[in-house]
Image (spheres, coloured by chain):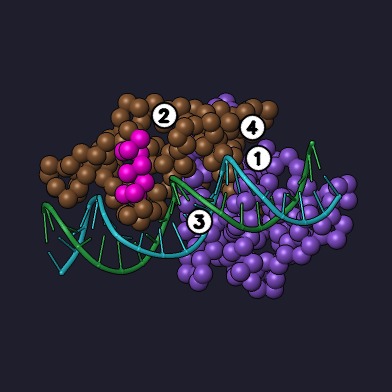
Chain colours: A brown, B purple, C green, D cyan
Amino acid sequence: MDTSPQDCAADLLEVVPLIMRGVRAEVRRDRTPELSMPQFRALSFVERHEGSTLTEVAQFLGLTLPTASKMMDGLVDAGYVQRAPDRRDRRKIKLHLSTEGQQIHEAILLQAREFLASRLQHLDPNILGDIRTSLRVLRTVFEPVSVPGEAVGAA
Amino acid sequence: MDTSPQDCAADLLEVVPLIMRGVRAEVRRDRTPELSMPQFRALSFVERHEGSTLTEVAQFLGLTLPTASKMMDGLVDAGYVQRAPDRRDRRKIKLHLSTEGQQIHEAILLQAREFLASRLQHLDPNILGDIRTSLRVLRTVFEPVSVPGEAVGAA
DNA sequence: TATTGTTATACTCTATAACTATA
DNA sequence: TATAGTTATAGAGTATAACAATA
């Protein structure tokens, strides 16, 4: 099938929120205390970028610094994240996941994946492959241009 | 490419929030007053299902009734939505978009589509077609099972 | 008795503005 | 002077519980 970026954009705008709604419900389900979607994404980021700074998390999530700071308060209070000063630049703090933080992140990740997989399970494997190919392209196009945590050496 | 629902689910969980972040920023950008993502989606739903009830909107958005009611307060105050009693069943209210509501919905829709299209514009048309095919499948899988507004006659 | 919607209350998410500490 | 982060404040988004009106 041949199509225009505009058509594709229109479809994306309808389908992406539908998927997001399901994921959000799953992330929050049956959990005390609940973890919000942004908190879960923050956990994912810190897990993947151990020792990243608050500014990096805020940039990745598309949040302001005060918002990210407050969200981290919640995660620190819950015992999922630890703050540690950066000796090289004492204005910065480095963020780390606690064991508990790793565990809850893993649990939610698996639960959300299971939910998505359950919806996908009756699809033909070839179609699943096509979807993954599409997702790989979409990722390159919508990924933030730079994730500073990846290139700390230069900073 | 051949793959499992689990692999596909894992990719979805990473890519969908990335796209969502961009869309959200675009919906809220340069607007007074800002329209939140849920408000925009509510406007979309009412536009597509004129005269739908609050319960239907809440179900579509995955919100509780009180939350949907409060959100509608905001849209009504802003002059974008009108509430009208249902003569057949006076517990219900029917929701309608005002001209202003239609205009702002259209404006935001076009702006969000343009943002997405700008990210997609350098992709090969065949790849865009593949993405649309994938989105069509994903829509069938994640769409709410029934949108009551579609079958009011039976109710 | 069940359904539709609102009100009351509380907590999180988010932003802007003002501030502290460090570079 | 600029950057990293927090605090103060305010408004929206969300939920549960309790309520009113209607079926």
Q: Position of residue A99 (x, y in %)?
A: 32, 26
Give the Cα separation between the discs numbered 4 and 3: 25 Å
Task: Determine if marks 4 and 2 fall on one subunit.
Answer: yes
Span of residues in magenta: A68-78
Residue at 64% across, 71% down: B79
Q: Chain of mark 3?
A: B
Q: Is residue A47 visible?
A: no
> What residue is disc 2 on?
A104
**Which numbered circle lies on residue B24?**
3
Q: What secondary structure is the stretch in magenta mostly built from?
A: helix
Residue at 60% across, 36% down: A130
Give the Cα separation between the discs numbered 4 and 2: 23 Å
Q: Chain of mark 2?
A: A
Q: Are marks 4 and 2 in contact (CB under 8 Å)?
A: no
Give the Cα separation between the discs numbered 3 and 2: 27 Å
Q: Chain of mark 4?
A: A
Task: Determine if marks 1 and 2 fall on one subunit.
Answer: no
Q: Is residue B146 left or right of residue D13?
A: right
Give the Cα separation between the discs numbered 1 and 4: 7 Å
Q: Is residue B91 left or right of residue B68?
A: right
Mark 4 or 2: the one toward you? 2
Q: Are marks 1 and 4 in contact (CB under 8 Å)?
A: yes
Element type where label 1 sits in the image: helix
Q: Are marks 1 and 2 in contact (CB under 8 Å)?
A: no
Q: Are marks 3 and 1 in contact (CB under 8 Å)?
A: no
Give the Cα separation between the discs numbered 3 and 1: 20 Å
Front-most of residues B119 and B67: B67
Element type where label 4 sits in the image: helix
> What residue is disc 1 on?
B142
Element type where label 2 sits in the image: helix
**Which numbered circle lies on residue A119?**
4
Going from N to C along the chain, the mark reached first, 3 or 1, is 3
